[in-house]
Amino acid sequence: MRVMPLPLGFVFRSRAKEEKAPVADKAQVNFSKQTRDPQAPKGRPTPKRSEAQSQRRSVANTPLTRKDAAKRQRDERRAAMERQRQALAGGDERYLPARDKGPVRKFARDFIDSRFNVAEFFLPMAVVILVLSMVRVASLQSIALLLWLVVIVLIVLDSVVTAFRLKKRLAERFPGQNRKGAVAYALMRSLQMRRLRLPKPQVKRGERP
């Protein structure tokens, strides 16, 4: 039986392929075993070590949730107080304190601001009376004492008349609504000087509310 000789090229080519195949398989295995940075985006190159460390530090330095909540509450309170201050200066009903909200309280404020009240002049009159009482003259001290009595009587009478009229107007203007505390609220406002009242007056003197 005659055996056909194999070509030399076939022998060398086969050996070369057999030697290169394990190397290629090892390279594929090594490439597949290569780890990828978990912080690297998919499909992008792995970040440098310095970048990865900076990212870890930024995550570690992130404030806790409780601190974030406390800071948010402080910011909200500060913003609410600022809105309230602006509302007291401008009369915006949306952000006024609870004691000043509502159409009944607004009418009570306007009623007091639209008229002259004896009680609002108590502070300047008290200063004058105090100065007179400190002068060591018997007649001036007697006048100061008499002025104290006159001022107190005028304030009481004016407050009674104001309360009666305001209560009547509130009953006509807001029947069936809660008017509790509105008269006392108005009388306390009448004790303050007009320029110092909060919320600021929205009507002129003599203007009917």
Image (cartoon, rainbow, N blue to C red):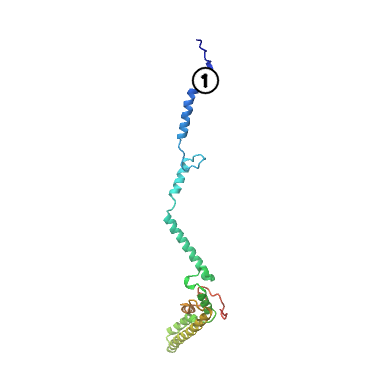
Q: Residue furthest front?
A: 1
Q: Mark 1 falls on what kind of element?
A: helix
Of residues 36 and 130, the one drawn nearer to the viewer in this rendering: 36
Please name the amino acid that badge 1 sits on: Arg
For mark 1, what is the residue? 13
Q: Is residue 77 above or below residue 140?
A: above
Q: Please report the residue visible at 45 percent of the width from the left and 48 percent of the height from the top.
A: 59
**Mark 1, residues whose alpha carbon is within 10 Å: few (<14), some, or many (≥20)?**
few
Location of residue 199 in the rendering, given as x and y in whole percent from the top left corner: 51, 73
Location of residue 104 in the rendering, given as x and y in whole percent from the top left corner: 51, 76
Of residues 174 and 31, the one drawn nearer to the viewer in this rendering: 174
- Number of labels in the image equals 1
Q: Is residue 76 above or below residue 161?
A: above
Location of residue 103 in the rendering, given as x and y in whole percent from the top left corner: 52, 74
Q: Split into 4 quadrants, where in the image is the C terminus? A: bottom right
Q: Is residue 168 above or below residue 44?
A: below
Of residues 127 and 43, the one drawn nearer to the viewer in this rendering: 43
Location of residue 32 in the rendering, given as x and y in whole percent from the top left corner: 47, 34
